[in-house]
Amino acid sequence: MSETRPGVLPDHLRARQTAERREFGVQVVAILMAVVCFSAAALFTDDMNEIRKERQLVIDPESTKGLPSDIALLGKLGTFRALAIDWASIRAGRLREEGKTYEALQLHETICVLAPRFPKVWADAAWNMAYNISVEQYSPEGRWTWVKNGIELLRDRGIQFNTRALLLYKELAYIYWHKIGDIMDDEHLNYRRALAVDMERTLGAPPVTVDDAGYIDWFREIVEAPRNLQGFIEGDVEVRHLVSALEAVDLAPDSSLLEFVARHDRPELRESDLIENRAALDADRAAGLAVVFDEDSAEALKRLLAAVRSKVLREKHKFDLDMMLRLMVEEYGPLDWRNNFAHALYWASRGDEMAKDYHGLDRADQLNTARLVFFSLQSLIDRGRMVLYPDFDDPFMSYLDLSPDTRYIPYLHDAYMRLGKRLHEDHEDYVEGTPGPKFMNGFVTAMQNWIFLLYFEGGERNLKLAENYYAWLREYNPHPDGTTQSRYMKTLDEFVMGDVLSQLQTYRAAGAIIRNLVTRGLKQYSLGQKRSAATSLARAQLCHDYWMQDSDADINDRMKLEPLDRIVRNQIIDFMKEPTFEPLFKARLWRELPLEYRQVTYDSLRQYFGELCESRSPVWSVSAAFPEPAGMNAARRRMQKTGGPSEPGADVEQGEKHKD
């Protein structure tokens, strides 16, 4: 019979007891460690939340206010949201391939709500609107509506949810630069007109200033205006009285006031001596005009307009006013915000600034955004000087003329160097003083274009810049074997004019080049650029002289050109009678033309001038708009002695090579 020892546990029970004690100890230690960890984590909660906001991993509740309840509910699908996004994305892609762009758009908008922090969905939806749906419309109004919808989707919503997503800024800049600014869309001119008119409605016609500083100071008044409009009105006694007077004539301190001022503060009225009967223009809105243009409230109106413009630019167009001014003062010069390329430049620069040092930055997006900065500035060089006579009732009927503006050349040069260094300085092939390997080819091509533009515009400053750029090409754009390229071993005159003169190989080519230079000169006269216009005509004379001297051109393809003064005369007549040119443009040209050109064209244009002035509403004064040149009697006698100005094509005969 076995004997049990009292008070002694069996070995298996003792082992279990020991294990239970150890397990309990582990649990206690684990609980204590969890408490310590949670306590420590709580100390970093604020920092973690800041990181989540910075990386756009959470949605700010303020940004989702105002969404329809059914759409807001979609964001609460939990784990099923990912499945919904995948299905909608696949379905939208198929619909787009089938040409069902409207159905695809609806799915894109749903995806944007389901995944507001995923930039690609916003970019796809905006592209569908601006590029796919727009071209299915049959009117400029319909097309522009959908291009605007794409812009507003990115600008007003996509960027709101993804403030540091470079992709969205790049896509927005691209729409302004390519869809509106390029020639690929048949309605691109109407898009430019509509945007320019909308911006002039907000800003008013730009001031006439003697230099860039005056223009920037004009815009600075808007930037520095009070940004609490209602508080400003209540705090400024004169402005408050003016607002009360405006409300009495159905004008409020908003976009309606800006449009009223833009409609009636036109260049035609500033040059009021052109108008026979100004009262006819003012009759419809006499009460409003009396209040708006009351001299006693001129300063109060100026302050009020600046504040209203500030509000519209910030709230409607989503501009950062301080950045706009900084771009104008420090980086890109006197930007004309009516020009679509200025908008492209702003959004590309804005994206580059907002995305700087962002963790999710894509290298390709960085390079392409920098290229959009370059492309936008180059487009401003080619088409940055705007002449606009808006039709606020039908913007697509507005007169718009774009011409080169060499003021932006130094700014583009600096942008290439600044962005190129930042994006390439770590590259093994980067050379100090260049824009870097990725931008080099485009930079060289652009620089050669700048040299030609600066040379033909003339002036000491422009020629000095052209010389500097030419020297840069000689040093930094060598032959592949490292030697200086032979085309740069010439003087600047030989480099530029040699290229132009080399094109004068046929009668037609010579005539086209010379007439192009003359037309450029006439446009420059109409813009008040007398020095540049005189330079253009001097270049035309040089080409004319070159053609008329002995050359190696085929005798069977060679004819004598008309004398240059006769070519200029005929170009002036054609320019004046061209129906697409704004009449005020013509009046300014007439005022700036040298006396001898006005004398030889006046009799041919006198009847047309009368008909043109009679067609204006209100009627213009012929003697003010197109006055008879001084000394016409003597000029007529002189022309009678020389046979008078002949008609186009007269005295053109078969040429012969010069013989000894």
Image (spheres, rainbow, N blue to C red):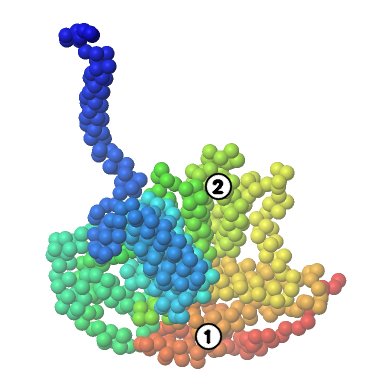
Say which mark, if any, is on residue 577.
1
Distance in Å between CA atoms under marks 1 and 2: 46 Å
Q: Quadrant of the N terminus?
A: top left
Q: Nearer the viewer, residue 659 or 42?
A: 42
Residue at image mark 2? 435
Q: Splitting the image into 4 quarters, where does residue 275 fall?
A: bottom left
> Can residue 438 be seen in the rendering of this structure?
yes
Q: What residue type is labelled 1?
A: Lys
Q: Residue at x 63, y 46 (%)?
A: 476
- At a point 24% along the width and 55% down the height, the residue shown is 62
- Mark drawn on residue 475: none
User: On screen, 648 above or below 466?
Assistant: below
Q: Which amino acid does label 2 sit on?
A: Pro
Camera sees residue 405: no
Q: What element carries label 2?
A: loop
Image coords of residue 173 (percent x, y): 44, 60
Expressed as whole percent of the image width and height from the top left, the position of residue 596 reads: 56, 79
| Residue at the image point whose x is 27% and y is 16% from the top | 12
Q: Residue furthest front?
A: 1
Task: State the image coordinates of residue 304 (x, y, percent, origin top left).
Answer: 23, 66
Of tags 1 and 2, the one toward the viewer is 2
Q: Is residue 529 left or right of residue 518?
A: left
Secondary structure under the numbered disc 1 in the rendered image: helix
**Label 1, residues with CA under 10 Å away: few <14, some 14-19, many ≥20:** some
